[in-house]
Image (cartoon, rainbow, N blue to C red):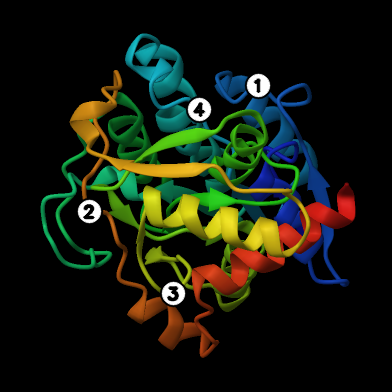
Amino acid sequence: MKAIVTGISGQVGKALLAAAPADWTVVGVDRGALNLADPAAIARLVAAERPDLVFNPAAYTAVDRAESEPELALAINGAAPLAIADALASHGGRLVQVSTDFVFDGTGGHGYRPDDARNPQSVYGRTKAAGEDGAGDRAIIVRTSWVHAARGANFVRTMLRLMRERDELRVVADQIGSPTWASGLAATLWGLALQGQPGIWHHRDAGVASWYDFAVAIGEEALALGLLDSVPRIVPIATTDYPTPAKRPAFSVLDVTATRAALGDTHVHWRTNLRAMLIEEKTFG
């Protein structure tokens, strides 16, 4: 059995490679090997490898920059999943598409279920919703949120850097979601793929947090592990105090009940997974 994993320089791509079953052949590609904005290149790769699965965690993830580069964001986030699905249709392989909580507007006030209506409020969210549509009915689509991993580009590592550089940090406290460790997400992606479970699924770590809560926990855990000598003052602020080009959902907690039931696994709290990620980060130095 063979799988292609896109975006292997990213944190989810790396986690997928690490979680791959021993009896699978996995072909990893990064942006240098595959231009996701080029449908012809996608078709050539799929035709050459004839995979049973294509995992597509690669995405245009610069949420604010996407507001000024909507065409490029749409080509990577929206058109590429369609091109992969079309290329796979000729020989029966399945697409596993990673999506986002940003497809929701954040006004619901409840955990979003997979079948809840989407209403993205940003270019990033709209292009990822287009990617879900392009992936088609045979695909496995997994929405997630606030992903982090050791050595990745993410909120946790940004906070660690800023905590070493500054005496005070101001962090938004009125956007609520759930952090997600990339390793747990990769296990869910492989689990659903091996079950051949098409449809839309949600994955996140257990528990909820604001970005402020997350930052406070990062400081506490990093201090306990010796990654920080001290923790600066962390001040909660409102979204209106930190305007950004792209609108973020105020409440984007994902309901993962169906996913956990399908896989029959343990839902690990985000703080436990944060600690595991920071231990890994310390190991890497």
Q: Nearer the viewer, mark 3 or mark 4?
A: 3
Q: Residue at x 22, y 53 (%)?
A: 251
In terms of secondary structure, where does tag 4 sit?
loop
Give the mark nearer the N terminus: 1 vs 4: 1
For marks 3 and 1, give the one nearer the viewer. Answer: 3
Say which label, 3 or 4, has the lower sequence index: 4
Q: Earlier in the sequence, mark 3 or mark 1?
A: 1
Reading the image, the residue beneath label 3 is 206
Q: Secondary structure under badge 3?
A: loop
Looking at this view, name the residue that lies furthest to the top. 68
Task: Kindly check if marks 3 and 4 are in contact, taking CB atoms under 8 A apart as contact.
Answer: no
Mark drawn on residue 60: 4
Residue at label 2? 251
Q: Quadrant of the N terminus?
A: bottom right
* Quarter-of-image position of residue 239: top left
Q: Report how far apart the C-alphas of labels 1 and 4 lie in the structure.
A: 12 Å
Relative vertical location of residue 16 with respect to residue 260 in this rendering, above or below? above
Which quadrant would residue 6 be assigned to in this image? top right
Please tell me which residue lies in front, 273 or 241: 241
| Three-letter amino acid code at the position of disc 4 | Tyr
Residue in front for this viewpoint, 172 or 48:
172
Amino acid residing under circle 2: Phe
Q: In front: mark 1 or mark 4?
A: 4
Q: Which residue is mark 1?
A: 35
Alpha-carbon span between mark 1 and mark 2: 33 Å
In the foreground, 80 or 264 = 264
